[in-house]
Image (cartoon, rainbow, N blue to C red):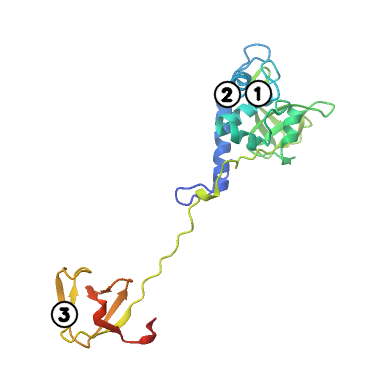
Amino acid sequence: MFRKVKRTGDYMTKQEYTDSMIKKVITLATKEVGYKETGNNITKYAAYFDKEYPEFYNTRKQGASWCDIFFDWLIVQIYGKELALKVLNQPLHSCGAGCSFSYSYYKEHSKKPAIGYQIFFKDTKGKIVHTGIVYKVDSTKVYTIEGNKSNQVKKCSYNLNSTKIYGYGCPDYSAGYKKDTEPEKPVTPVKPKMHDYIVIAKSGLNVRKDPSDKSKIIRVLPYNSEVLGIDNGTEWLKIKDGYIFKKWVKLKYSNDY
């Protein structure tokens, strides 16, 4: 099963991005099950690389064994040309269509399977000769989708301790993830502090509906009366029911700030 990761807002965490990309690759591989080569190792997968992306491999690949070509094709379709090389950790003009070379390119390898890993098989002499993609793992078996299995794309399964299994390559499915796509942690706004003011206008101080001397007068504060207000950095103070002109009041306590 794919690991479920709690979403935060509308962005993806790195793990969530990785899981979503693995799911896309597996979904595409599943759709290809049943595809058969049209001649001796003649496939649409090799045709794609030869025509659309000839610099991916060291030579043209139509007619070559295509199990690894199938896996690479899946990655390119989902990630695009540039990122696919990062997922597979391969250079341009690589020998990655060969299973042993493909295995050697990976930075990380594993003896245990996981969904999305590239599985590699060996012959009786221990040479890597075949490959596929892991789409499911349970307590006893690993389940794969393999290209060029009986000349087609086919689902298979093996005991976890099968002597046919050489090991697993670990693609970097996080390739393309950008940390800066995560939003910054929200800053908790600081609630403005109210201060105690004294009215110094001899004739009283108008309380206006809005911070403007054109705004409607709500009431008048008497001289020397006290009022709680919030200083928003303008010439007006916000009080409970309106605004007052800051020049006509003074702080009751000089240590308010």
Which one is in front, 228 or 141? 228
Residue that sits furthest to the top in the current view:
39
Q: Position of residue 93 (x, y in %)?
A: 69, 27
Mark 2 and mark 3 lie on one chain; the one further toward the N terminus is: 2
Pointers 1 and 3 in contact (CB under 8 A)? no
Residue at 33% across / 80% down in the picture? 195
Q: Residues within 10 Å of mark 1 (few under 14, many from 20)?
A: many
At horizontal 37% and vertical 70% (from top left) the residue drawn is 191
Q: Give the residue pinned by disc 3.
A: 220
Q: Mark 2 near mark 1, Cβ–Cβ under 8 Å?
A: yes
- Left or right: where does residue 244 sit relative to residue 18? left
Question: Which of the two marks, 1 or 3, is nearer to us in this view?
Answer: 3
Q: Which one is earlier in the sequence, the residue at label 2 or at label 1?
A: 2
Looking at the picture, tell me which residue is in the foreground, 82 or 106: 82
Q: Secondary structure at mark 3?
A: strand
Determine crowd level at label 2: few under 14, some 14-19, many 20+ residues with C-alpha closer than 10 A: some
How far apart are labels 1 and 3 at the CA level?
85 Å
Instruction: Pick the quarter of the image with the C terminus.
Output: bottom left
Gap in Å between the C-alphas at discs 2 and 1?
9 Å
Question: Which amino acid does the dot numbered 2 rest on?
Answer: Glu
Q: Look at the numbered disc 1 and give the secondary structure of its residue.
A: strand
Q: Position of residue 246 (x, y in %)?
A: 26, 77
Q: Amino acid at mark 1?
A: Gly
Q: How many numbered dots are placed on residues in this image? A: 3
Instruction: Give the mark nearer the N terminus: 1 vs 3.
Output: 1
Please tell me which residue is depicted at 57% across the width and 46% down the height of the picture: 15
Q: Is residue 246 above or below residue 135?
A: below
> Which of the 4 image quarters holds residue 26?
top right
User: Label 3 amino acid?
Assistant: Val
The residue that disc 1 covers is 147
In terms of depth relative to the viewer, which is nearer, 141 or 62?
Answer: 62
Residue on which the image places disc 2: 32
